[in-house]
């Protein structure tokens, strides 16, 4: 007589909701490899990745006018357009 198999059950300490994600073939392979290498389920790998993800800080766009404009450091809007274009080789 064969033993009855029970479904994989993970005891969660907080409520979980099931969701689906679409991944490229490359990411599917990477996820499977990470799960195998760490001995965890793919869901656990994804949960950890999401928990540790940090949005990269926004970088301010800095307009470099090095050497093409001299002045008192006033507003860029006050600089003559021809001087600005000179900084771009025009």
Image: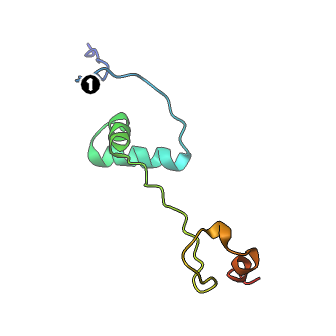
Q: Position of residue 89 (x, y in %)?
A: 73, 84
* Horizontal side, residue 50 vs residue 1: left or right: right
* Horizontal side, residue 51 vs residue 58: left or right: left
* Horizontal side, residue 44 vs residue 66: left or right: left
User: Eyeballing the image, is 56 above or below 40?
Assistant: below
Q: Where is residue 27 in the image (x, y as percent from the top left)?
A: 49, 47
Residue 8 in which image quadrant: top left
Q: Quadrant of the N terminus?
A: top left
The residue identified by callout 1 is 10
User: Eyeballing the image, is 50 above or below 1?
Assistant: below
Q: Which residue is most to the bottom?
A: 67
Residue 86 in which image quadrant: bottom right
Which residue is nearer to you in this view: 39 or 89? 89
User: Eyeballing the image, is 13 above or below 24?
Assistant: above
Which residue is nearer to you in this view: 55 or 2? 55
Q: Quadrant of the C terminus?
A: bottom right
Q: Position of residue 49 (x, y in %)?
A: 36, 44
Q: Residues within 10 Å of mark 1 (few under 14, many from 20)?
A: few
Which residue is nearer to you in this view: 66 or 36? 66
SS class, disc 1: loop
Q: Position of residue 79 (x, y in %)?
A: 67, 74
The residue at 35%/37% (across/down) is 47
Residue 48 in which image quadrant: top left
The residue at 37%/34% (across/down) is 43
Which residue is nearer to you in this view: 2 or 45? 45
The residue at 51%/61% (across/down) is 60
């Amino acid at each position: 007589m064969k033993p009855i198999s029970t479904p994989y059950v993970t005891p969660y300490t907080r409520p979980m909701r099931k969701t689906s994600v679409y991944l490229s073939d490359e990411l599917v392979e990477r996820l499977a490899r990470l799960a195998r290498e760490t001995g965890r389920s793919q869901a656990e790998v994804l949960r950890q990745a999401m928990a540790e993800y940090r949005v990269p800080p926004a970088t301010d766009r800095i307009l470099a006018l090095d050497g093409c404009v001299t002045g008192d450091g006033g507003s860029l809007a006050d600089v003559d357009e021809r001087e600005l274009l000179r900084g771009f080789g025009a």
